[in-house]
């Protein structure tokens, strides 16, 4: 059976190869950071963001346990501050919204920082690059966050980027993901 996580990885795999520079904008427990790190290898680079000490500790422990190359930078900061830390083009990026699995469920990503983070991420992703945004509408902020992201992306010029939404049709409040691909005509900066 297909899973949303495996489907996301299949979309990313086309863009994330040895030597690429990528970002995990919501590192959580480090599973996406791990996948990205192994995928880009020793010659690549991974930026990973989270605001919780527990996320950084869990991610660092996972990366060390799995023997990842030291190609990552774990950053304790909100994803909307990404331009303070990233000063080079990215091949791809990942947002996995919601709360830290196993952590405090009252701490979630917020639409007030997530939307600016996505818009800023799009300014550093190379033409032809991509961004994955996993949305969890099972709680009120997650629902509102997803609606705002979808509404905003729907207004972008399709000649510059294409945004797709993938979800399971026969499951209520099911997580879904948005796949954004920057077209080759995209020149960077504001869309």
Image (cartoon, rainbow, N blue to C red):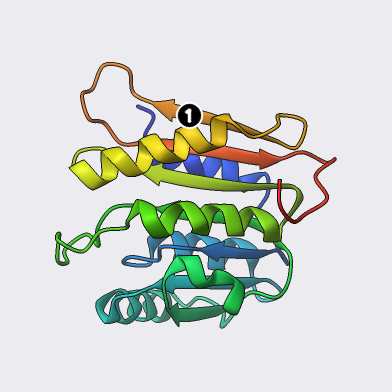
* Residue identified by numbered label 1: 165
Is residue 4 in sight in this rendering? no
Q: Viewer-proximal residue, 188 or 179?
A: 188
Residue at horizontal 32 percent and vertical 56 percent from the top: 110
- For the C terminus, give its image quadrant: top right
- 156 left or right, relative to 147: right
**SS state under label 1:** strand
Residue at horizontal 68 percent and vertical 71 percent from the top: 44
* Residue 25 vertical placement versus 118 (above, below): below
* Residue 92 vertical placement versus 103 (above, below): above
Locate residue 134: give its quadrant: top left
Residue 188 location in percent, x, y? 77, 54
Locate residue 31: give its quadrant: bottom left
* Residue 100 vertical placement versus 85 (above, below): above
- For the N terminus, give its image quadrant: top left
- 75 left or right, relative to 54: right
């Amino acid at each position: 059976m297909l899973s949303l996580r495996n489907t996301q990885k299949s979309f990313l795999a086309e863009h994330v190869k040895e030597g690429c520079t990528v970002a995990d904008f919501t590192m959580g427990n480090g599973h996406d950071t791990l996948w990205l790190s192994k995928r880009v290898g020793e010659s690549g680079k991974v930026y990973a963001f989270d605001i919780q000490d527990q996320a950084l500790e869990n991610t660092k422990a996972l990366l060390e346990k799995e023997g990842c190359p030291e190609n990552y930078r774990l950053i304790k900061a909100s994803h909307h501050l990404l331009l303070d830390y990233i000063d080079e083009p990215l091949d791809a990026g990942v947002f996995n919204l919601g709360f830290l699995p196993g952590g405090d469920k009252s701490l979630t990503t917020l639409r007030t920082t997530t939307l600016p983070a996505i818009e800023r991420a799009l300014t550093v992703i190379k033409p032809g690059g991509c961004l994955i945004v996993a949305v969890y509408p099972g709680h009120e902020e997650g629902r509102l966050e997803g609606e705002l992201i979808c509404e905003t992306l729907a207004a972008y010029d399709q000649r510059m980027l294409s945004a797709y939404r993938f979800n399971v049709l026969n499951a209520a409040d099911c997580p879904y993901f948005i796949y954004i691909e920057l077209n080759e005509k995209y020149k960077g900066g504001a869309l």
